[in-house]
Structure formats: structure tokens, C-alpha cells
Image (cartoon, rainbow, N blue to C red):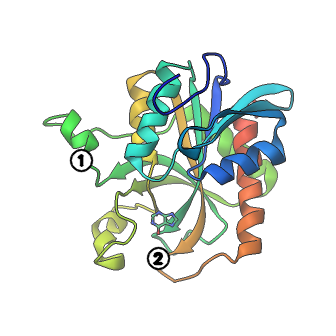
Amino acid sequence: MTPHNNAKKGDYAEAVLIPGDPLRAKWIAETFLDEARCVNTVRNCLGFTGSYRGKPVSVQASGMGQPSLAIYVHELINVYGVNTFIRVGTCGGLSEKVKVRDLVLGQTASTDSAINRNTFGAFDFAPGADFGLLRAAADAANAAGVRWHAGAIVSSDVFYQPDGLDGYATLREHGVMAIEMEASALYTLAARFSARALAICTMTDCLVTGEELDADQRQSSLEDMVRIALDVAVGEI
Ligand code: HPA
């Protein structure tokens, strides 16, 4: 038990999917897992454990943004023994090459957050995905016939950027293809505590073209992404 989590030791599997939204965690557990049970209810930031293809797996909501995710992930590693994290989320597109519905596998995650700046002193740490998970996710996406891109993303503390797309100009010039709000902290904590992590994001809204997914497309894309993430989490790829 922790101030943020009323699960007991042993309640989480070693591999955990991390969506931002608690209701998406519930939907994943109820739709895809066998014998799912709720293990965390604190603040309604729901967590569940069940099995997929006969192997144990959990899903825990992170809430929005890096400070929230960092609390859950720190405790999942250090209190509950989790060693594999797959974030399943949405992202905004920063490149015309990434179409809505495409999966973005975050190979690296830059950030405007001060968390790492305050931690690494003179250095800019480069948060990156676990290569094995990244390769497995690419293989799983190929097998599912889902378009994907692996590359640089940015985890921003700011959803409503006052300068709009101009605020991301330099990042775009350096190949950053999508924006979300959590991966950088996830990769940093995984590195610190020798865990494995990958962020898989469905591109739902392109900041360059204004293209957006409608509700039905959003749902089917999320289903594809979750199946891919679960296959990777239980090592079926
Ligand atoms: N910004 C940050 N996170 C996001 C976005 C965005 O535009 N779209 C989906 N997640």
C-alpha cells in the first residue's frame, strides 16, 4: 500500500500497460483481459490485473502528465516489482508523414519538463525506449497490418501551447514527429531502476494539417494499439 495505491504486494503482474485515462484502463481490463480484477482505486486512478493469452498482465492508469505518471511508475517498480511498462496513449502529430490512426513508437522522448533538468545538472539526459520492446512492437504492428513510425517524440507539460505549432518549430526541424505528455518521465524512471519501457501512441490529431480521428476511428485504432501492446507485454511477439 502507498498513499496513491491500495494494491497489496503481489497484486500487479511484472508487465503493466499504462494508459493515461482511468476509464480506458477499465475498458482495457474488461475488454481484453481474462479474469481481470481491480487492484487500485485510490483517486479513481484505476489499476487492474488479469491475464492475456494465459499470461499475467496488469493495466494501471497514469493520470495526465509526467508528475502524475512518475508517482505511479516509481511505486510500481519499487513497491510492486513491476519491470516492464508499455504506455498506450494518444499523441498529436507534428509531421505530415504521420497520418491519423498511425502508431508512433517513441524511440526517444524529449521534454520541456524541468524534472530531468533538475536531476542531471550539467547534462541533458536522453530518455529512450527499450530496444527489445520497440522491435517487438514494430513486429506486432507489421503482423497486424497497422502503419507505424519509430522515432523522436516530445513529452510536453503544456497541452495548450500559447504559440501553437510555432512553439514546436525547432523540434520539428530536428525530426520530432509527435507530441504527448508522459513518455519522457516513463523512460527516465525505467532507466533509473533498470526496468523496460516503451510508449506506443495512436496519432489522433495532426497539429500540422488539422486532421482528426472521429469517434469510431478512434475506438478501432485504440483496439489495434492495445492488442499490439498486450502481445508485446506478454512476450508473444
Ligand atoms: N498535445 C499533447 N498531447 C496530446 C495531443 C496534443 O496535441 N494530442 C493527443 N495527446
Q: Is residue 195 visible?
A: no
What's the amino acid at mark 1? Ala
Q: Is residue 119 left or right of residue 42?
A: left
Q: Is residue 227 above or below residue 187?
A: below
What's the amino acid at mark 2? Leu
Quadrant in which residue 216 is drawn = bottom right
* Residue 114 disc label: 1
Measuring from the top left, give residue 173's x and y in whole percent. Answer: 33, 67
- Which residue: 69% across, 61% down? 147
Q: Which quadrant holds the C terminus?
A: top right
Q: Is residue 146 above or below residue 106?
A: below
Of all residues, the one furthest to the left in this rendering is 122
Question: What residue would you read off at disc 2?
Answer: 207
Q: Is residue 38 above or below residue 93?
A: above
Measuring from the top left, give residue 105's x and y in whole percent. Answer: 56, 50
Please tell me how crowded label 2 is: few (under 14), some (14-19), or many (20+) other residues with Cα within 10 Å: some
In the image, is the residue at mark 1 within 8 Å of ligand 1 by its beta carbon? Answer: no
Q: Is residue 134 left or right of residue 106?
A: right
Quadrant in which residue 60 is drawn = top right
Of mark 1 and mark 2, the one earlier in the sequence is: 1
Which callout, 1 or 2, points to the residue nearer the camera? 1
Measuring from the top left, give residue 137's x and y in whole percent. Answer: 66, 43
- Which residue: 75% across, 65% down? 219
Q: Nearer the viewer, residue 70 or 185?
A: 70
Q: Is residue 117 left or right of residue 68?
A: left
In the image, is the residue at mark 2 within 8 Å of ligand 1 by its beta carbon? Answer: yes
